[in-house]
């Protein structure tokens, strides 16, 4: 049985890469809730106060959103490749996009906050909005889609200097496109556009085009070589552009107190919105990994791939498990309802004295992943044996 033969409904390497980045994503969210330093306001990217271990704990999670969005575009291509018409794909993108945008507001925000003090429009919202736009673009030739995607990725930083001040409708629209910004809705309520859609759309479009490498008749060795050398090329391009220190990221690196921290500043790149350099290094490394993962198959990789097969279910479940686990440990370690009444209970508003060392946080993260594996395995088995149309939206 080959990866693209009888197992054509799922591509193991894609599921595995998606599973890996989702496991890493849970590390970042576990840190948000359980790490004492993070709860006290420490910024892992602040070179004046961070440590290399703390820095990389955050930096490694930069791969999650771009790889997730990129592979969502690939999934659209594979969805279409199963014999669906452009019209069917367009309708699916439209309805799923609207669904994801509603899910962000109605389900994910409460799971993050346990309140509605802030409506944060994050990665699920961005994917939904990109799908909404993609539902119209899907009728364009694939070469045109590729050129649009590349133009967005390489050119959107030209827009960095455009700022629309204030809290008016025009400012909100620009925030949706390219500028992260918060808008007050009332005295105790705000909306934060955390993931402006434009750079993410470029990633989704190029991810869709990468799906051509996974057609039935495409030679496996040729595909792996293309992925490998393209990935290496993107990494080299990152180093070259970053070295020039003129374009591609709003943060310019500087020589720091020693070579280690200079290196950290060199790779410190902007995620909101994802800069050209952010995209080059994350997708470059991801493509190299994807080229190597086709030959990986063992008990651990098969378990990690389960997460990649049920990404939406996993995303909802991991927020619920992390938040409830933090809630339970808060009380076990002496927390009181009075403290919760005073502070709320979310990752940005926990009592500052709640939390653990970074090492303990890693142990908690591993325990959470073990817990999550079992419901994700059950749901994956359920999806594989039941073929209801609504399951494609979950």
Image (cartoon, grey):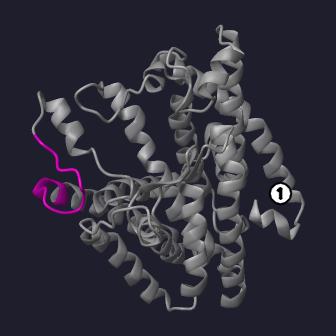
Q: Which residues, given as a range, are shown in magenta?
A: 241-254
Percent position (x, y) of residue 28? 50, 36
Q: Nearer the viewer, residue 223 or 339?
A: 339
Residue 74 visible in the current orientation: no
Percent position (x, y) of residue 194? 47, 54
Residue 258 is left or right of residue 272, and the answer is left
Percent position (x, y) of residue 16? 59, 50
Q: Look at 49% across and 87% down and name the residue there.
A: 142
State the residue position of label 1: 383
Figure quadrant of residue 9: bottom right
Magenta-colored stretch includes residue 135? no
Q: Is residue 22 above or below residue 332?
A: below
Q: Look at 63% across and 56% down and name the residue there.
A: 12
Residue 158 is left or right of residue 317, and the answer is left
Percent position (x, y) of residue 116? 65, 45
Residue 103 visible in the current orientation: yes
Q: Is residue 278 above or below residue 172?
A: above
Q: Is residue 363 above or below residue 140?
A: above
Q: Look at 21% across and 40% down and name the residue there.
A: 265
Which type of secondary structure does the marked residue at label 1 adopt?
helix
Figure quadrant of residue 128: bottom right
Residue at the front extreme?
187
Residue at the top extreme?
334
Crowd band around label 1 with a 10 angstrom C-alpha radius: few (<14), some (14–19), many (20+): some
């Amino acid at each position: 049985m080959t990866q693209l033969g009888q197992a054509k409904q799922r591509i193991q390497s894609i599921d595995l890469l998606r599973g890996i980045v989702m496991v890493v994503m849970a590390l970042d969210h576990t840190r948000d809730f359980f790490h004492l330093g993070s709860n006290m306001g420490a910024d892992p990217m602040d070179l004046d106060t961070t440590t290399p271990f703390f820095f990389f704990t955050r930096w490694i999670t930069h791969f999650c959103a771009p790889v997730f969005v990129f592979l969502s575009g690939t999934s659209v291509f594979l969805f279409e490749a199963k014999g669906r018409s452009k019209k069917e794909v367009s309708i699916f993108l439209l309805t799923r996009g609207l669904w994801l945008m509603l899910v962000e507001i109605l389900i994910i925000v409460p799971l993050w906050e346990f309140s509605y003090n802030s409506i944060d429009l994050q990665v699920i919202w961005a994917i939904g909005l990109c799908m909404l736009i993609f539902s119209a673009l899907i009728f364009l030739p694939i070469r045109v889609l590729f050129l649009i995607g590349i133009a967005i990725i390489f050119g959107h930083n030209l827009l960095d200097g455009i700022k629309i001040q204030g809290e008016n409708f025009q400012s909100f629209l620009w925030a949706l496109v390219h500028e992260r910004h918060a808008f007050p809705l009332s005295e105790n309520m705000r909306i934060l556009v955390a993931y402006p859609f434009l750079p993410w759309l470029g990633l989704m479009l190029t991810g869709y085009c990468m799906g051509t490498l996974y057609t039935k008749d495409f030679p496996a060795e040729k595909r792996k070589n293309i992925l490998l050398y393209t990935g290496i090329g993107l990494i080299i391009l990152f180093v070259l552009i970053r070295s020039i220190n003129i374009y591609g990221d709003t943060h310019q690196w500087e020589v720091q107190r020693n070579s280690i921290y200079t290196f950290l500043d060199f790779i410190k790149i902007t995620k909101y919105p994802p800069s050209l350099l952010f995209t080059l290094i994350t997708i470059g490394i991801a493509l190299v990994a994807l080229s190597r993962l086709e030959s990986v198959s063992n008990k651990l990789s098969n378990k990690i791939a389960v997460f990649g097969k049920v990404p939406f279910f996993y995303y909802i479940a991991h927020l619920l498990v992390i938040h409830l686990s933090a809630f339970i440990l808060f009380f076990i370690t002496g927390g009181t309802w009075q403290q919760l009444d005073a502070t709320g209970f979310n990752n940005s508003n926990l009592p500052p004295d709640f939390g653990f060392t970074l090492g303990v946080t890693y142990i908690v993260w591993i325990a959470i992943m073990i817990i999550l594996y079992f419901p994700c395995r059950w749901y994956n088995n359920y999806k594989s044996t039941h073929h209801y149309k609504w399951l494609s939206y979950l």
